[in-house]
Image (cartoon, grey):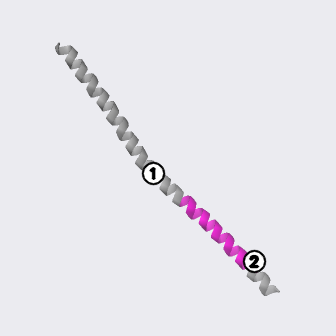
């Protein structure tokens, strides 16, 4: 009886530890993947915004020069 009880308790504890480990690993993996994806997306968006602003600035500068030299 004691052996059976120990076996059941041991199995349950191992299962719980396994579940906790799985959740922790999953959370860490999620955070890492999220950070990587976030960095990539942030970099792309930042680049596009910078490109848009510099393009707008270039267009304004060209327009200004065209107006100035007419």
Identify residue for label 1: 37
Please provide percent x and percent y for residue 69. Answer: 16, 15
The earlier-in-sequence mark between 2 and 1 is 2
Tell me which residue sits at (31%, 27%) in the image.
56
Mark 1 surroundings: few (<14), some (14-19) or many (≥20) residues within 10 A: few
Q: Is 11 on the left-hand or right-hand side of 5?
A: left
On screen, 16 above or below 26? below
On screen, 70 above or below 35? above
* SS assignment at label 1: helix
Q: What secondary structure characterizes most of the magenta part?
A: helix
Please provide percent x and percent y for residue 61. Answer: 25, 23
On screen, 39 above or below 62? below
Circle on res. 15: none
Q: CA distance from mark 2 to mark 1?
A: 41 Å
Q: What is the quadrant of residue 65 in the picture?
A: top left
Q: Nearer the viewer, residue 27 or 48?
A: 48
Q: Which residues are magenta?
A: 8-28
Tell me which residue sits at (71%, 79%) in the image.
10
Identify residue for label 2: 9
Mark 2 or mark 1, whichever is nearer to me: 1
- Furthest toward the top, the residue is 70
Please provide percent x and percent y for residue 18. Answer: 63, 71
């Amino acid at each position: 009886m004691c052996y059976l009880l120990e076996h059941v308790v041991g199995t349950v504890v191992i299962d719980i530890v396994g579940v906790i480990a799985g959740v922790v690993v999953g959370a860490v993996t999620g955070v890492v993947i999220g950070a990587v994806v976030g960095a990539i997306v942030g970099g792309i968006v930042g680049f596009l915004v910078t490109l848009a602003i510099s393009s707008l600035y270039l267009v304004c500068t060209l327009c200004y020069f065209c107006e100035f030299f007419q």
